[in-house]
Amino acid sequence: MKKKRLKIVKVPKIVMVNCWSDSNKGDSAIIEGTINILYKVFPSAYISLLSMFTEKDPRFKTAFRHLRGKFPEVKFAGSPMDFSSYITKKRNSFFCIAVLIRIEKVFRKAGQIMYSLLFLLFLKLKRTSPPNYSIGIIKEADFVLSTGGHYFASPGRNILDIVKGLMGIYVHCYPLIIANENKVPFVICGQSVGPFDSILSRWFIKYCFKRASYIWVRENLSKNELLRCGIPEKKIQVVPDAAFALKPHCTERVKEVLQRKGLSSEKFIAVSVRQWDCPYYKNYIDEVAKTIDYIITEMGIKVAVIVQTMGPTNIENDLISSRQLISSIRQKEQVVLVDEDFSPSELACFYGKSLILIGTRFHSVILSFLEGVPSVAISYFGPKSHGIMKMFDMERYTLDLRSISSEKLIPLVEELIFNRKKVSDHISKKVLESRKQLYNIFLDLKSFHKKVV
């Protein structure tokens, strides 16, 4: 009698790179949603998260405080490169790049050639640096995911903007370059990308992205930007944001805060604002404040200003902009500030208790959508707000921060309140479709893994 051969199925080692911080609830929501799908598709996978902070950075200790509790089996490690110290050591290289940008303005073609050669040399120098623990994790992986978000961009055409944009692109591409050199497949997972305003930034995106096994972007606007960079259309797929795979969790802490703040279900409007370094910022805050005064005086509805993001950098601390907003509101007695350090799944539950949301942080919109809460999105940068709202057939409820006014915002608020049930049902249906689509694209990744093992 012949013995049956046992089929050995290799458990995949998956490394997620470019992971930011739980203080930014949007980034944390993307990671949590991605891990949810990965465990659904690869139930026994070994998952590692590589932070954008080195383990020597004090921010690393608290960067994943919520995710560690949610996924104790996941390995958390520091950044594969200390970018800040690297800039100090290699500042002469960056100075040369800045000089070549000036040359490029005079000798466009020749400047680009010199520019590209120097950058290739720069990459080669970095790749020969001594390996560290996190680089070892990448080398041992079955595949690497560049976590979703919006960090591949290079806006601006002056020297400082171009150099800053290139460094940002490089630091996020670095773990992908390491993966590629060690023949580890990598995936650009759920990105918004662009704008890329310099020729070199478009060249470098093409240099890195064309080596990806999959390129998943969150909206057609990002797809078009990659096509402009020279990426073949067949390599690009438009997918939902991974945060749609997150599951809201109504904990006792959420219930306690709602009760303490006097917020009853569907009896308040939630608002999220953020800092933004632009000439239109003060007008934006003032116009949202006027809208809130109208909501309170004319509609008799309470307002909760929610601190969506708490860092880890100062510009990401929404407590600052939230306090600025409240100071501009006349009817302060009917406004509450919610600055609890909720996990993304708790925050989704909190938004779910609101009547509608006015959201600048786009992941406040996504988290509210998870509970079917209609939202007006205020777009401040890049394609994600307009693109994703369009995918949900709700683009008309998107306003631009640069041109926002209470005259535009108030009618949209009234319309969403009046049609809440209909809009809510539509959103809930779209969320289910998004989750199904996310699951299916990760099944493609499972098939790909089987082929390469």
Image (tube, rainbow, N blue to C red):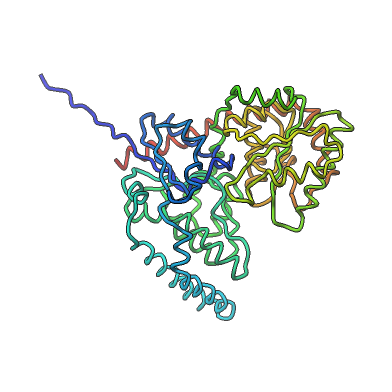
Looking at the image, which residue is at 42% across and 41% down?
76
The reply, left or right, for residue 7 in relation to residue 192 is: left
Q: Quadrant of residue 323?
A: top right
Pick the quarter of the image with the C terminus.
top left
Q: Position of residue 277 (x, y in %)?
A: 69, 56
Closest to the observer: 148 or 434?
148
Residue 139, image x, y percentages: 32, 49
Check the image and name the residue furthest to the right: 298
Q: Residue furthest left?
A: 1
Seen as rendered, the residue at the extreme bottom is 106
Image x and y of residue 352, in percent? 67, 27
Q: Position of residue 160 (x, y in %)?
A: 59, 68
Q: Nearer the viewer, residue 293 or 214?
A: 293
The part of the image, by quadrant, that contains residue 158 is bottom right
183 horizontally vs 154: left or right = left
222 above or below 14?
Answer: below
Viewer-closest of 254 and 426: 254
The residue sitting at 40% across, 70% down in the picture is 121
Residue 211 visible in the picture? no
- Residue at the image point whose x is 71% and y is 43% from the top: 273
Horizontal arrangement in the rendering, residue 357 relative to residue 441 (left or right): right
Quadrant of image for the N terminus: top left
- Total marks placed: 0
Whether residue 49 is visible, yes or no, is yes
Indicate whether 404 appears above or below 247.
below
Q: Nearer the viewer, residue 33 or 393?
A: 33
